[in-house]
Amino acid sequence: MLRAYAAAGFPPGDFWGLTPRLYLTHMLGASDRLEREHRNTAWLAWHVEALHRAKKLPDAKQFMSGGGARAEKQGQVAIRLGCLRASLPRITQAQWRARFSNQSTS
């Protein structure tokens, strides 16, 4: 386990202070980071080759901005958060804490 932890890029000395849950969290995070880096590298390779084959290069400003897809995603996130907010009960933080403390003592 120490070998895998060090191979994931973490300092080996930190390993001994971890709980099993923290170890798992660190390793899952490292796995997510590696998958994201792989996706980014594949995206870059695909676009380099696509631009190499293009007869005419697209406008750099439009190409770099992504063409508005990000704004659409942010709008979708706002809609989902609004729906979630509407479905949740409206309680104060004190009420939430009281409810949680009652459940943990049962």
Image (cartoon, rainbow, N blue to C red):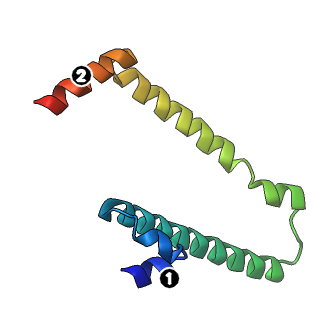
In the rendered image, the vertical position of residue 30 relative to residue 48, given as above or below: above
- Percent across and percent down for residue 43 are 66, 72
When asked about the image quadrant of residue 51, the answer is: bottom right
- Report the side of 103 relative to 82 (left or right): left
Identify the secondary structure beneath mark 2: helix
When asked about the image quadrant of residue 105, the answer is: top left
- Location of the N terminus by quadrant is bottom left
Q: Nearer the viewer, residue 87 or 69?
A: 87
The residue tagged 2 is 99
- Percent across and percent down for residue 2 are 40, 80
Which residue shows up at 31% across the image and 23% down it?
Answer: 97
Q: Which of the two labelled residues, at mark 2 and mark 1, occupies the earlier sequence position?
A: 1
Residue type at the position of mark 1: Ala
The residue tagged 1 is 7
In the rendered image, the vertical position of residue 91 relative to residue 36, given as above or below: above
In the rendered image, the vertical position of residue 62 relative to residue 79, given as above or below: below
Q: Residues within 10 Å of mark 1 (few under 14, many from 20)?
A: few
Q: Nearer the viewer, residue 27 or 77?
A: 27
Residue type at the position of mark 2: Arg
When asked about the image quadrant of residue 99, the answer is: top left
Asked if residue 90 shows in the view, the reply is: no
Asked if residue 75 shows in the view, the reply is: yes
- Report the side of 90 relative to 10 (left or right): left
Q: CA gap, disc 2 to disc 1?
A: 43 Å
- Percent across and percent down for residue 58 are 86, 65
Identify the secondary structure beneath mark 1: helix
Which residue shows up at 53% across the image and 74% down it?
Answer: 11
- Location of the C terminus by quadrant is top left
Q: Furthest residue to the left?
A: 106
Which residue shows up at 25% across the image and 27% down it?
Answer: 100
